[in-house]
Image: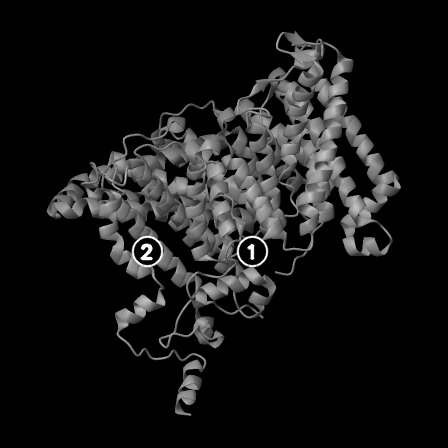
Amino acid sequence: MSSKKSDILEQAPGIRPLSNGAAWWNMLRSNGPLPILLLLLIPLSLFIESRTFGAYNQRIVMLIGFNIVLAVSLQLINGFSGQFSLGHAGFMAVGAYLAAYPAINVSEKLTNPFMVILFFLALAIVVGIGCAVMYGLFVLLRLSRHLHTSLPAILLIVLLGWIITDVAKGSTHENPPIYFVWSNGLSFLQRMFTVIMLQSTQAMTAASNWLPVAARKPIAYLALLIGGGGCAAVAGLIVGLPTLRLRGDYLAIATLGMAEIIRIAIQNAQPLGGALGLTGIPKFTSFAWLYGVALITIIVLWRIAYSAKGRAIMAVRENEVAASAVGLDPTHHKVVAFVIGAFFGGVAGAMFALHERSITPSYFGFQKSIEIVAMVTLGGLGSISGAILAAIILTLLPEVLRPIAEYRMILYALLLISMMLLRPQGLLGGRELWPKRRTAAGREPVATEDRDDSQNTGVAPA
Amino acid sequence: MQELTQHFINGLSVGAVYALIAVGYTMVYGVLQLINFAHGDVFMVGAVLILLIGRALGFITPEGVTGSWLAFALLGALSIAACGVLGYAIERLAYRPLRDKPRINSLITAIGISLLLEYGGQHKSVFGPNPQPFPADMLPGIRAPLFSIGEIAISRVDALVLAVTLLLMLTLTYIVLKTRTGLALRAVSHRVDTASLMGINTNRIISFTFVLGSTLAATAGILYAIKYPKVDALMGLFPGVKAFIAAVFGGIGSIPGAVVGALVLGLVEALVVGYVPNGSQYKDGIAFVILIAILLVKPSGLFGKNVVEKV
């Protein structure tokens, strides 16, 4: 009788059951087998990187790791928020290039972590100014519906162009005025960036020398991962804000287009190596780093997906109208999922770049995006462990089927079609290999537990 | 001025090719609310099949090609008919079983079909991964200018593209506006279930839409291959996506909108290549910039119905 009473208390809305074990034990249990795997990484990496395992096998294991991070991060976007994105390779490219560039140019072979951090700070400042100006112009243009009211905006553009032209001299007057303002604005920001970097090089190098030698490379590496991921997240925000208002198929095309724009932009950017790509990137990603980051990614995305926020994201996926009727802002939740997914896509790209030594824009094309989408679809939309499983299967499959490797992409195509016709829910179909979340008593959570969600999602206007 | 006119004519003829593809997108979207991702690849199949059928029938041999407009017309007709069958098969096998399932399933299937056509075509037993020259020499004198006004020359290629497009558009307008099938098509695109209550065989009309769209796309593929005498298995990707953007620009579901959107897109591209420094490198990106801009400013497009979706 008394035990039944405590059951009711535990299930009361808004009241989390008190844990009856040590905190670390609950932490381990609530994340499934993942933290235990984290502890196994070091002995495993000794085996994987030993000579007996072989370079070829090691390479496949690494590829599986990158694909797991990519598939799991895309799962949040495509599976949980239901926004069908076809441009994940674009975010991967942003992460890869914006980690590779500072790794080559400012990090002194990863021994100068503070320069890396400064690089991303300077980038944030410069891009922030650029975006603020663009956004200001956009708001001005939107405020003014008619020609005579848009005059201030036009005047402002002309004035801005004139000022910037004075600052950054040396361009010819043959180009059309809009292009002129644009390119001079860019070179102004570029100059600002260079000045920030040059002014602080000495201080940053001194600070890095103060760090213990063993800590320098890992800190630089982490800074590159977070910086690369952050840039991808910003790209995700810029891409997501306008496009996520669109419905399914429009969004697919728009994200595909955005990824292509990113690729074409990189291909035409001389500092990023153009079509030839970047070479001479220091190699640092090891098995332990890659799988450590992958496990952290899985844990973080797991905790997001099966949290109150995750439920809200799924609610928006199921029915936008119903979700907004209960006070969830659909655009907000879609953008949040998109930005987080883009961040981890960028992290995967950064790790990839720091493993491959050289990257080219053609690697991050449409085909790469499709590969990741195939993983997510095969695993089942809305299943993190499914995405992991599918990433492993789809990376191993072409290797196992070496003799018919030329059929790989045809196989992907047939897989997508037959999957949709025969088993549209994917391998796991929204379920997970281990329980989604446990209370301290080891039960599946009850639905009422997440009532406290309402405070961070805002209330829809009446 | 002469340069501008030349760019203008070039843009118009590329835009006409886009228009032929865009009409297929917009009609399918009209009846099914589905973006037929594979449509751009039907365009590719149209061009590739001419080459393959020509080889099989002996018109195109490694030594040379038979220079005859009649032979080319025969090959074209065969290829276009085959693409019509392909369009029917795609709808029947891949889209119809999924019609009452969530839209995302049809979308993924459409991507799958598109990949299947692209990578199937790239396989060496079908066509091969490398671009191959298109036998435009089968049309004697196609490269010669048709006539010139002052220093502006209009090539026979551009004239052919524009004439064929105009003819097909007139035929399409006649079919859609004057025939019973066209009436049924308009009814289905208005509302499928009501149309079927009125005794319209909606499955037949949807199949008809796919066949019509695919034949137009195949024709566009052939014209494109004559204009840029090269064929490869991935040639459908960019024209396909651009035609889709053109359809969105004009307001998806609206046939005149798709044509206008495609012509504008072709013109903008030609002008950017002509006048912006390094423009040719950015050529493929422009369409996407236009798409994003349209979706931001006027998502319903130029002629689109302003559907208020309760979100």
Q: Which residue appears at 40% of the width and 80% of the height?
A: A15
Q: Which residue appears at 67% of the width and 56% of the height?
A: B308
Compare residues A323 and B67 and report the one nearer the observer: B67
Q: Quadrant of residue B179?
A: top right
The local crowd at label 2, few if under 14, some if 14 to 19, many if 20 or more residues have their Cα within 10 Å, is some
What is the x, y in percent for residue B177? 85, 40
Quarter of the picture containing the N terminus of chain A is bottom left
Which amino acid type is marked by label 2?
A: Ile
- Closer to the N terminus: mark 2 or mark 1? 2
What is the x, y in percent for residue A268? 42, 29
What is the x, y in percent for residue B114? 60, 37
Q: Are marks 2 and 1 on the same chain?
A: yes
Please name the residue that numbered disc 1 is placed on: A425
Label 2, label 1: how many angstroms apart (C-alpha)?
26 Å
Please name the residue that numbered disc 2 is placed on: A296
What is the x, y in percent for residue B283? 53, 29
Extreme residue in the top direction:
B63
Quarter of the picture containing the C terminus of chain A is bottom right
